[in-house]
Amino acid sequence: MRGVVLSLRREKILLLADTHVGYEVELRRERGINVMSQTRKLIDGVLELVDHHGVTSVAILGDVKHELPVPRESVEEVKTFLRAVARKVPLLLIPGNHDSLLQEIASGIEGVEVAPARGVLLEKYLLFHGHVKPAKEDLERAEGVIMGHTHPAVVIRDELGYAVKEPAILKIYASRTKICKALYEEPCRRRGRVKVVVLPASHPLITGVDVREIPKMAAEGRTFLKYIEWNPESVEIYLTDFTFVGTLSDITNIV
């Protein structure tokens, strides 16, 4: 599954990222590629995970919708998606960089809550999209950060040279002190390492970015990962069924 289940004391939350509802509009309008709407498939996939894991709620960590700058063609599809999930379980949305007017679109849909873009702290986990700075006090208290935004994927090649790109989940062990100094120009009160989990895109047509390219992309882009000191041996890569592929160092050294 392109997400994780977060088990808290009283809740079991399905965490997804980058559903990009309405992505097909851009494919048609900007690239001339005509594909059928994937919204029903996306809805069915989310509801199947809800039933399978018995979760009590769903949280989408940004880029719920895709169309920019102002959503026009995809508004009704976004509303359909939100209603379908919220009829099943409460739905928490944390806005991402594609989520212009998300609050207005979600307004009046029962069971949907739109959180601040800086994220929310649920017990010891900080959830956000990853395109803005989280609140310093949340980062100080969090033992884990879970985000989206980067669309990680891994290229798997067999002995004959055939290659396939698969969505991936990253687990990064990073210095909290170095992140705080880079983000806020002052250290955090709490030291030690923090675990950063990066979820893949949930949209079925989006595979993602080769994990080997992410450190360079992060350094040049607007992402929380820009403030992490990349140690390839501290970046673990998993397929969406949680099969451990290796570390970024392992992947980089494969010829």
Image: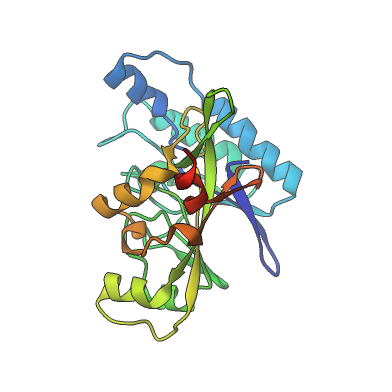
Q: Residue drawn at (53%, 43%), measured in percent from left and top?
A: 168
Quarter occupied by residue 10: bottom right
Tell me: residue 107, above or below residue 78. Answer: below
Is any atom of residue 108 visible in this view? Answer: no
Quarter occupied by residue 18: top left
Q: Of 203 and 164, which appears nearest the observer? A: 164
Q: Of 232 and 209, which appears nearest the observer? A: 232
Residue 230 in the image, given as x and y percentages of width and height: 38, 60
How was this image coloured?
A: rainbow
Q: Residue drawn at (48%, 51%), measured in percent from left and top?
A: 248
Tell me: residue 140, above or below residue 87. Answer: below
Q: Of 115 and 12, which appears nearest the observer? A: 12
Residue 40 in the image, given as x and y percentages of width and height: 57, 26
Q: Of 103 and 173, which appears nearest the observer? A: 173
Residue 96 in the image, given as x and y percentages of width and height: 37, 49
Tell me: residue 178, above or below residue 84. Answer: below
| Residue at the farthest bottom position | 189
User: Which quadrant would the N terminus be assigned to in this image?
Assistant: top right
Residue 217 in the image, given as x and y percentages of width and height: 30, 47
- Position of 31 compared to 77: left or right? left
Total marks shown come to 0
Is any atom of residue 131 visible in this view? Answer: yes
